[in-house]
Structure formats: C-alpha cells, structure tokens
Amino acid sequence: MKSIKILIAAAAALSFANVPAHADYVAATWGDNRVHILDDSFNDISSFAVGQTNPNGIGTDGSTIWVGTFNDSTVRAFDYSGNLLFSWGGSGFSNLQGLDYMNGVIAIANGSQIQYRNPLTGALISTITGPNITSTIEGIDFDGTLIWAIADQNLYGLDPVTGNTISTIPNAAVGCSFSGTGNASINASQMALACSDGSWFVVNSGTGAVITSGNNGLQMFGLDRVLAVPEPGILSLLGLGLGFLGMRRARR
C-alpha cells in the first residue's frame, strides 16, 4: 500500500503537464511506434515515442494517456508531454487490441472479451463477454452509456455491465485492414473511426452513416477522444474503480 501511495504521489505531480492547444484526439501508431495528438480534423499536432513496438489500444482521461502495446501486452501511462508515469503487464490477456479509460477503470479488449482493470496496477476487476464474433475486437470506446466495439462488418454497442449487445450499426471502416483499428465517441450522436492506412471516418452513432472522412497518413491502431474538461489526472483514480463497481452492484 505504501508503494502505491508513493506511486500515486509521483504520478500526480506529472499528470497536469500542459495539454497542447486544439488537442482533440490521441492516436497510437505503428511504423513510428508513437502517440500522436491530433486536432479536430485529425491533423497531427505533436507526438512522442512509446518505447515499445506496435502500440495498439489507447485511452485518456484528459491529462493521462494509457497505451497498450500488442507485442509485450503491457500498458504504459504517460502525461501529454510524453513522460512515462508508470506501467504494468497483464496476466490473463495477450496480443492487446482495444483499450479505453472509463469510469475510473481501464477496459481492455482480449479476443471477444472485455476486461476491466485497475488503472494504476493492472489488477483484474471483472470481465464481460462481448458480441458473438468470429474475429477479435479491434477497438473499444465508452460513450458514457455503451461500450462500442469494432468487429468485422459492424460496430456493437454493448451494455458495460453484462456485455449484452444493445445496438448494432454498419462499420464504415470495413474496407480497411482489420475492418478498422480504433474508435472514439465524439458526442451522443457521433463517433470517429480510425484505420491503419490513415483513413478516418466520422459517423452517425445511431445509423453508421458517414458524416465526413479523410486520411492523415498515420498508421492508427488506437484512437480516443480528449475530454473537453480534463479529469484531475491520477488523483481521480484514488477510488480504483469503486464508482464503477457500485454501478455493477446497483444493476444487479
């Protein structure tokens, strides 16, 4: 416990590093093995090295960025200046694909399962089973109500407690490799999708219809939206997911 408190104090001192102006998305990219900070049109603002090959899933609370790497199944936490805050490996998941920060926990896509883990230590909190698919979930994102998962030809909106599929919409990124490799909720009605060839799409999250699209040339293997009002970084994690667990108990 003492070591965790020391870790929290050290990480909190760095968690309020300045977020670049006009930062709207963060993307994990292969090829250069970096995190790229993007504006609202998916243009590159700045970037930093992850320190490992093939960064895949990515999530942020607005001041801390968690990056999961495919090759070593490790999650690393950075501030927006690229300073490494801490890291943890995963017992029970491999070939990490999608990742998101939600309600004080880290959600990790492992095959067709989604695991909820402690953001500071990686300790497993709970697991849900995602949609009945033949491939793996390539990306996940929590929109405040549902977890959206990219898989095959569809995007699946999942109940975060049970894993039941609540909504299914066509996947605009189906023509990309792996049918898309990242997604991020923009607001209650729009979602962004990312591809490994740099293609991106903004779609209607009710119908899947494409609203706008483009290509930024980045090998995006993970995407997340930067919160408009950042949470208080590592300090917000002191509850270690208690709020999320309370939600689970209430639903039961």
Image: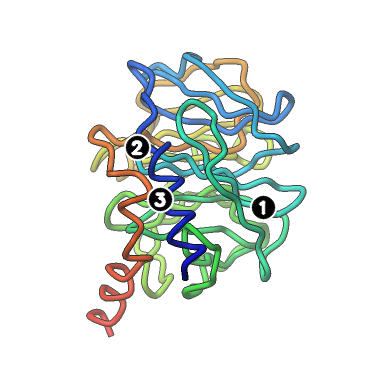
Residue indicated by mark 1: 74
Q: Give the CA distance from mark 2 to mark 1.
A: 21 Å
Q: Amino acid at mark 1?
A: Thr
Q: Position of residue 106 (x, y in %)?
A: 46, 57
Q: Is residue 127 something one can see in this rendering? A: yes
165 or 69, which is in the foreground? 69
* Residue at 48% over, 75% down: 126
Q: Earlier in the sequence, mark 3 or mark 1?
A: 3
Dot 2 and dot 1 residues touching (CB under 8 Å): no
Q: Secondary structure at mark 3?
A: helix
Q: Secondary structure at mark 1?
A: strand
Q: Amino acid at mark 2?
A: Gly
- Quarter location, residue 89: bottom right
Residue indicated by mark 3: 9
Q: Give the CA distance from mark 3 to mark 1.
A: 22 Å
Front position among marks 3 and 1: 3
Q: Give the CA distance from mark 2 to mark 3.
A: 18 Å
* Residue at 32% over, 65% down: 239
In this rendering, is residue 96 above or below 211?
A: below
Q: Is residue 180 something one can see in this rendering? A: no
Q: Residue 62, labelled with which disc?
A: 2
Q: Earlier in the sequence, mark 2 or mark 1?
A: 2
Q: Earlier in the sequence, mark 2 or mark 3?
A: 3
Q: Amino acid at mark 3?
A: Ala
Callout 2 crowding tier (Cα within 10 Å): few <14, some 14–19, many ≥20: many
Residue extending farthest to the bottom is 252
* Residue at 73% over, 38% down: 52
160 or 200, which is in the foreground? 160
Q: Residue 231, labelled with which disc?
A: none
Q: Position of residue 48 (x, y in %)?
A: 59, 24
Q: Position of residue 110 (x, y in %)?
A: 62, 62
Callout 3 crowding tier (Cα within 10 Å): few <14, some 14–19, many ≥20: few
